Image (cartoon, rainbow, N blue to C red):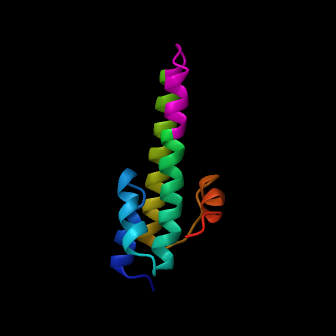
Amino acid sequence: MISKNSKAWAALSYIGALVIFPLITKQDDNFVLFHAKQGIVLVFFGIGFSVIANISFEVGALPITIGVWVVSLIFSIIGIANCVRGKETKLPIIGNLANKIQL
């Protein structure tokens, strides 16, 4: 059974830059690391697409940026819900990339 402490640390992984805390402090907790890896990919996904959209700022860049942040928010909510339930469910696309991260 996953402890409430592990669930809370894992949930931090989906709150933007706070992902760094579970990555640093919970190296021995596989549940937390599973979610932290997905959180770090999600952060880079959001930042990367926003930077690309803003560099090529055109009329269509703002809707793309907003869309990326909405998708990131939805993925974060799904990830936090999985943490609360104690599940290690991979997020679409993000989960496969996170599995490739070696810590």
Q: Is residue 32 above or below residue 42?
A: below
Work out whether residue 55 or residue 3 is closer to the camera in this orientation and state it.
Answer: 55
| Residue 20, quarter of picture | bottom left
Predominant secondary structure in magenta?
Answer: helix
Q: Residue at x 44, y 62 (%)?
A: 81
Image quarter in which the C terminus is found: bottom right
- How many numbered dots are placed on residues in this image? 0
Query: Residue 95: x, y in percent?
Result: 61, 59
Query: Residue 100: x, y in percent?
Result: 65, 63
Work out whether residue 79 or residue 33 is closer to the camera in this orientation and state it.
Answer: 33
Task: Tell me, yes or no, whether the highlighted magenta stretch contains residue 100.
Answer: no
State left or right for residue 78 relative to residue 21: right
Q: Is residue 65 above or below residue 21?
A: above
Q: Residue at x 48, y 57 (%)?
A: 39
Work out whether residue 77 or residue 11 is closer to the camera in this orientation and state it.
Answer: 11
Q: Residue at x 43, y 54 (%)?
A: 77
Q: Which residues are the magenta region?
A: 48-61
Q: Residue at x 64, y 57 (%)?
A: 97
Q: Is residue 78 above or below residue 89?
A: above
Query: Residue 56: x, y in percent?
Result: 55, 20
Q: Residue furthest bottom?
A: 1
Work out whether residue 42 or residue 80 is closer to the camera in this orientation and state it.
Answer: 42
Task: Tell me, yes or no, whether the highlighted magenta stretch contains residue 53.
Answer: yes
Image quarter in which the N terminus is found: bottom left
